[in-house]
Amino acid sequence: MKLPLWIEWLRKQPNAALRLFCFHYAGGTAQRAHQWTQQLAADVEICAVELPGRGKRFMEPAYTRIEHVLDDLIPAIKPLLEEKPFAFFGHSMGTLVSYELSRRLQRDHQLSPQVLLVSGHAAPHIPRQSVIHQLPDQQFWDRLIQLNGTPKEVLQHPELLDLLTPILRADFAVCETYVYSDSLVLDCPMVVYGGQDDPSVAAEQLELWRNHTSNECLVQIMAGDHFYLHNPSQHELQQHVNQQLQLVLSSVNLIR
């Protein structure tokens, strides 16, 4: 796999002390992370991981199993992880991908993020309460609309729905076919974010992430629903993430 296909460089800084990788949610693209470039510390290099089926990779078939995502992503991303300290941020599907990526990197390559920032997803051992990727189109979209992440203009254009539906079904299949294994606990610190009005993830399900690292785990609840990271808590989240990365940078600079 060619690296440029997987990584969108949102802010390239060769002398940065830390590299942050962002992982998009179901139906999302790497471009959604551009809003972070003006808010985070200047000495953080920001990259976004782009899965097939969207953006510049629109013509590639989307994955439907997380194992296949990791099999292809790791050879592409590993050289970047070996160059300098790194952190991961993922929301919803991106949480699941970044979490399982962290576990496999720790197990097979002795690599760990300086901090794993996860958002909008229940602790991975909790069984999913609903499976929607195989529902008929109308029921499928009815469930998506409940999450409040689909722009209204998309819903008004059938041709856009036709384009998005296969990608979203594939992304939801990645999440809904996921099978948790308790074979490894992470050794990196974690920060867990969620919206207080998220209909799909309860606060107590976020708290249970503490069981998945032997290190510190901070849980932060934000105002808003599943897509609180866009509105109304976008700036609050970015400020909090920035604070966490500053702590990492202090540690990294001391080591250097």
Image (tube, rainbow, N blue to C red):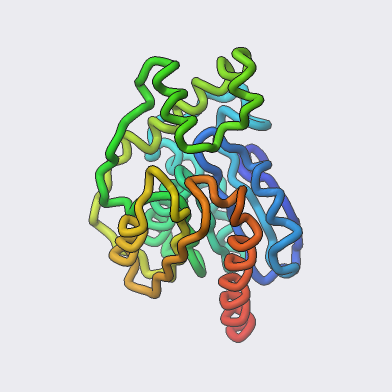
Residue 254 location, x and y as percent? 61, 86
x and y, in percent, of residue 256 in the image: 63, 82
Depth order, front residue of 35/175: 35
Residue at 62%, 55% (x, y): give it: 234
The picture quadrant where one finds residue 253 is bottom right
Query: Is residue 112 visible in the rendered structure shown here?
Result: no
Looking at the picture, tell me which residue is in the foreground, 17 or 29: 29
- Identify the residue at the far bottom of this view: 254
Spot occupied by residue 89 in the image (x, y as percentages of width and height): 53, 56
Q: In which quarter of the image is the N terminus?
A: top right
Q: Measuring 32% from the left and 51% from the top, which residue is drawn there? A: 124
Q: Is residue 129 above or below residue 251?
A: above
Quarter of the rendering containing residue 192: bottom left
Q: Position of residue 120 (x, y in %)?
A: 45, 50
Q: Is residue 16 left or right of residue 57?
A: right
Tell me, yes or no, if residue 72 can be seen here: yes
Task: Name the residue nearer the viewer: 122 or 77.
Answer: 122
* Front residue of this view, candidates 242 and 58: 242
Residue shown at 55%/44% (left/top)? Answer: 24
